[in-house]
Amino acid sequence: RSVMSATGRLALVTGGTAGIGAAISEALLAAGYRVAAAYATNGQAADAFSTRTGIPVFAWDVADFAACQDGVARVAMALGPVDILVNNAGVTRDAMLHKMTAAQWREVIDVNLGSCFNMCHAVIEGMRERRFGRVINIGSVTGQSGQVGQTNYAAAKAGMIGFTKSLALEGASRNITANVIAPGYTDTAMVGAVRPEVLKRILESVPAGRLATPAEIARGVVFLAADEAGFINGSTLSINSGKYLA
Ligand code: CAA
C-alpha cells in the first residue's frame, strides 16, 4: 500500500548518507519513493553509500541559507521538485554550559535548527503550489528531557518542535504536514562518541536496555511520509523505548 501511495514522490534527506539519515534514505527507497540524499563533508562515504544503494547524493552546508537554495535547485534540476523533506542533518558539540564556547553554541544552533529554516524555505513554495508536502524534522529526546552537556543541542531540538508546530499550521490548508520525530539514543557514530562510562549510565535509563537501531527511527519517517498520513500534523513522535514519556 505504501508503495502505491509513494509512486513518483521525491524525498530529500539531509545528512542522508550516514547514521539515522542513511537508514531513512534506504527505508524511503524500499517503500517506493524516489530519494535524494544530501551530505556536508564526507564525500568518500557519501559516494560509497550512493554506489551501494543507487541513491543520488548532493553536497552542501545546510547551515548556509544560500547553499540550501542552490542545493535544492540542483536536486530539482536532476530529479524534479521535492515532495518530502526530511531535516535530519545534525551535529553535537557537547560541553557543560560553563565550558561551552560561543562557537559550540552557534554551530549547533545553525546546523541543527537553522537548517530547518533554510531547507524548508527552499522547498515550501513549491509544496504550496503543488498542494502536497511532507516535512519531517528529526529532533531528539534531548529536546524533550534535557541532557547534561547539551544546552546547545537541546535548545536546537526543542526549538525544532515549535518551528514544526507553526509550519504545520501554515501548511495544513495546502495538504502540507510538518512533524517531528524525537529519537532516543541510537546506534550511530554520534552516540558512539559519548564516553563509555557516560553511555553506560544513559543506557540504564532506557527501558529496552539498548540503543535504537537507525532502522527503528526510519520506520517512523516512512509512516509520516505517506499520503495517508495527511491528518498527522504538528505532532512529535517519540521513538525512545519509553526513556522519556513526553
Ligand atoms: N546524567 C546526570 N549527570 C551527568 C550525566 C548524565 N547523563 N552526564 C554527566 N553527568 C554529571 C557528572 O556525573 C558530573 O557530575 P559531578 O560534577 O557532580 O561529578 C557532571 O555531570 C560533569 O560531567 P563530566 O565529569 O563528564 O564533565 P566533563 O566536562 O568531563 O564532560 C560532557 C561533560 C562532555 C558533557 C560529558 O558529561 C558527556 O559526554 N555527557 C553525555 C552527553 C550526551 O549524552 N550526549 C549525547 C550525544 S548523542 C546525541 O546527542 C544524540 C541524541 O539525540 C540523544
Image (tube, helix red, strand yellow):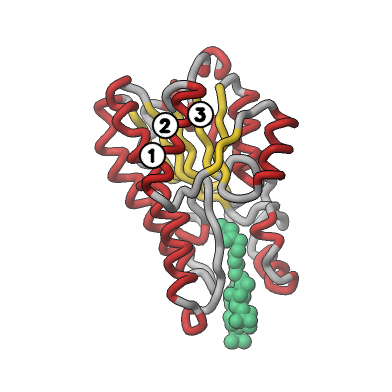
Quadrant for ligand 1 reads: bottom right
The answer to whether 64 appears left or right of 162 in the picture is right
User: Gap between marks 3 and 1, in whole Å?
Assistant: 16 Å
Q: Is 94 in front, or is 66?
A: 66
The residue identified by callout 3 is 11
Query: What amino acid type is highlighted by mark number 1?
Result: Gln
- The quadrant in which the C terminus is found is bottom left
User: Where, by quadrant of the figure, is residue 195 drawn?
Assistant: bottom right
Residue at horizontal 51 percent and vertical 23 percent from the top: 78
Residues at marks 1 and 2 touching, judged by CB atoms closer than 8 Å:
yes
- The quadrant in which the N terminus is found is top right
The residue identified by callout 1 is 69
User: Is the CB–ligand 1 distance for label 1 below 8 Å?
Assistant: no
Total marks placed:
3
User: Where, by quadrant of the figure, is residue 53 drawn?
Assistant: top right
- Circle nearer the N terminus (3, 1): 3
Q: Is 203 in front, or is 139?
A: 139
Residue at horizontal 54 percent and vertical 73 percent from the top: 149
Q: Position of residue 52 (x, y in %)?
A: 75, 31
Residues at marks 3 and 1 touching, judged by CB atoms closer than 8 Å:
no
Compared to residue 217, the image places residue 154 above or below, namely below
- Circle nearer the N terminus (3, 2): 3
